Image (spheres, rainbow, N blue to C red):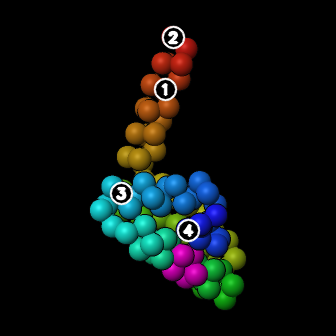
């Protein structure tokens, strides 16, 4: 598994490669950012910290003590719901 990053699945590796390609950034930089974010999240949860990760256009990941909750923005939820209805409609044809 040459180039495989510990802690990331093969599927995660593929997502990182796609993101790197779209952003014109090195894949290693994308993986490093994700791993750093995970370390912060692990620290917050293990020490009972309250922390919010804001994902622009997506939602907010809330870490409260040992609990984690993702709140999605309404616009994204509507877009996903519309896409799902469209995909379901196409699959039924």
The Cα atoms of the two marked residues, 3 and 2, are separated by 34 Å
Residue located beneath label 2 in the image:
93
Q: Which element carries disc 3, helix, strand or loop?
A: helix
State how far apart marks 1 and 2 are (Cα).
10 Å
Viewer-proximal residue, 46 or 19? 19
Report the Cα–Cα distance between label 4 and label 3: 16 Å
Q: Earlier in the sequence, mark 1 or mark 2?
A: 1
Outermost residue toward the bottom in this view: 47
Crowding at dot 2, Cα within 10 Å, few <14 / some 14-19 / many 20+, comes out as few
Closer to viewer: mark 3 or mark 2: 3
**Closer to the eye: label 4 or 3:** 4
Q: Secondary structure at mark 4?
A: loop
The circle drawn on residue 3 is 4
Determine whether the residue tagged by mark 2 lies in a helix, strand or loop. Answer: loop
Residue pointed to by mark 1 = 87
Camera-nearest label, 1 or 3 = 3
Quarter holding the N terminus is: bottom right
Q: Residue at x 30, y 62 (%)?
A: 24
First along the sequence among labels 2 and 4: 4
Q: Tell me, yes or no, if residue 53 can be seen here.
A: no
Whether label 1 touches label 2, CB < 8 Å: no
Quick check: 66 left or right of 60?
A: right
User: Where is 6 relative to 76, above or below?
Assistant: below
Residue highlighted by disc 3: 21
Residue 72 against residue 93 in the figure, above or below? below
């Amino acid at each position: 598994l040459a180039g495989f990053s510990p802690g990331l699945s093969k599927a995660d590796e593929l997502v990182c490669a796609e993101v790197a390609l779209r952003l014109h950034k090195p894949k290693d930089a994308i993986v490093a950012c994700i791993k750093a974010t995970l370390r912060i999240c692990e620290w917050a949860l293990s020490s009972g910290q309250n922390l919010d990760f804001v994902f622009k256009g997506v939602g907010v990941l809330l870490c409260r003590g040992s609990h984690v909750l993702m709140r999605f923005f309404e616009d994204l939820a509507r877009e996903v719901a519309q896409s799902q209805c469209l995909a379901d409609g196409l699959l039924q044809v």
